[in-house]
Image: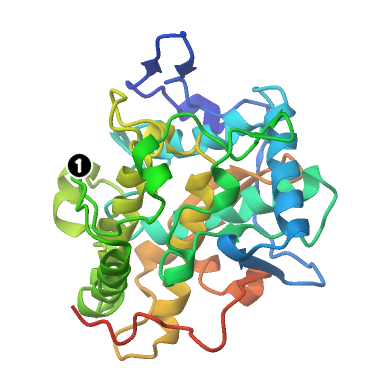
Amino acid sequence: TPDITSICKDSCLGFKNAEGAIRSRKCCPPSLGKTIKDFVFPTDKKVRMRWPAHAGTKEQVGKYRAAIQAMRDLPDDHPHSFASQAKIHCAYCNGGYTQVDSGFPCNDIQVHNSWLFFPFHRWYLYFYERILGKLINDPDFALPFWKWDEPAGMPIPEMFVPETIDGKPNSLYDVYRNAKHIKDRIVDLDYYDEDKNIPDKQQVLCNLSTVYRDLVRNGGDTLSFFGGVYVAGDDPVENGAKSVGSVEAGCHTAVHLWVGDSKNPNHEDMGNFYSAGYDPAFYIHHSNVDRMWKLWKELSLSGHVDPTETDWLNASYVFYDENEDLVRVYNRDSVCLDMLKYNYIENSKEVFPWRNSRP
Ligand code: C2O
């Protein structure tokens, strides 16, 4: 079994600010000399219920803050550390891994711009959530999600905003964000690099139509929603241009660019693959992106089905799990939330507030 660190190479991006703080371009995972195990489904008794970030209870927010702080307190070279978790994104997205396992050592692995997008990020968050729970000894720990598809959830969640809480650093704060957007609060799900400067009420309506656009109008069949076929041997860059999925290209990227600081050279943190994982907001954004996959299937429209191609089902990634074991996971095991023992708390009255927001 190959050691994943031996096939990982560093990305070419990096960033230094005036004070010298650095986002490292070294994004390969720590090597603990472990062999890779096959994934087994969790046997937890309770389902972890991810909660809407804007409506978290004091207890939920407190636990979440404590868990992220515990992650920040670990030494960087620990596989559960804040930096190691952030670097996973960099390694899989900035050419950290080549496709050496499949016999194409010169092609980088890229988990964006194709049908690997949803399953890769689902697995990433799956382990991240379990690691956080372990760090605070809470087997039921569940991540929040940034519910930007419902009007009340559209502002960046309040708990991410203050720099300090009771005189201590807020573990959910990140200095590399667009200060103007954080102050204005309501996200623009159709943001590219220009502020619309429209009243909040209108922005809310625009956002609802954008969600409709990505889940219904542009996501009418498997490949338009997931992104196009990407198999061993494909060149990720060339492939990317023609096959990005509707949510990935739409709401997903808009939120990254909206949160990231346009004053930084690569729009760090959220505005670039290699640095996005350093902002805790990345994980609650992706938790909602993951929820879009669930909601898309629940719309029960014809065409809303998971890919069934063998190449998709058998694509795999390697992660450190909550026990610091290296685990290989497959797309085929990512499709059923019941098996993964987590789900999302939904507001029963208004499950699809954007349902009637056809643009
Ligand atoms: Cu891996 Cu939101 O990107």
**Drawn side of residue 165 relative to residue 26, left or right:** right
Q: Nearer the viewer, residue 171 or 16?
A: 171
Q: Nearer the viewer, residue 56 or 308?
A: 56
Q: Residue at x 68, y 40 (%)?
A: 68
Q: Nearer the viewer, residue 302 or 217?
A: 217
Q: Quadrant of residue 189?
A: bottom left
Amino acid type of the residue tagged 1 in the rendering:
Val
Question: Is the residue marked 1 within 8 Å of ligand 1, measured from its CB?
Answer: no
Q: Residue at x 78, y 67 (%)?
A: 43
Q: Residue at x 60, y 40 (%)?
A: 172
Q: Secondary structure at mark 1?
A: helix
Image quarter of the N terminus: top right
Q: Residue at x 31, y 49 (%)?
A: 232
**Drawn side of residue 228 relative to residue 99, left or right:** left
The correct choice, above or below, for 130 with respect to 93 in the image is below
Answer whether residue 99 is visible to the viewer in this image.
no
Horizontal and vertical percent position of residue 30:
61, 26
Q: Nearer the viewer, residue 93 or 187?
A: 187
Q: Residues within 10 Å of mark 1 (few under 14, many from 20)?
A: few
Answer whether residue 95 is visible to the viewer in this image.
yes
Q: Quadrant of residue 18?
A: top left
Q: Which residue is mark 1?
A: 237
Image quarter of the C terminus: bottom left
Horizontal and vertical percent position of residue 151:
42, 70
The correct choice, above or below, for 198 with respect to 45 in the image is above
**Drawn side of residue 2 relative to residue 320, left or right:** left
Q: Residue furthest right?
A: 137
Horizontal and vertical percent position of residue 142:
69, 60
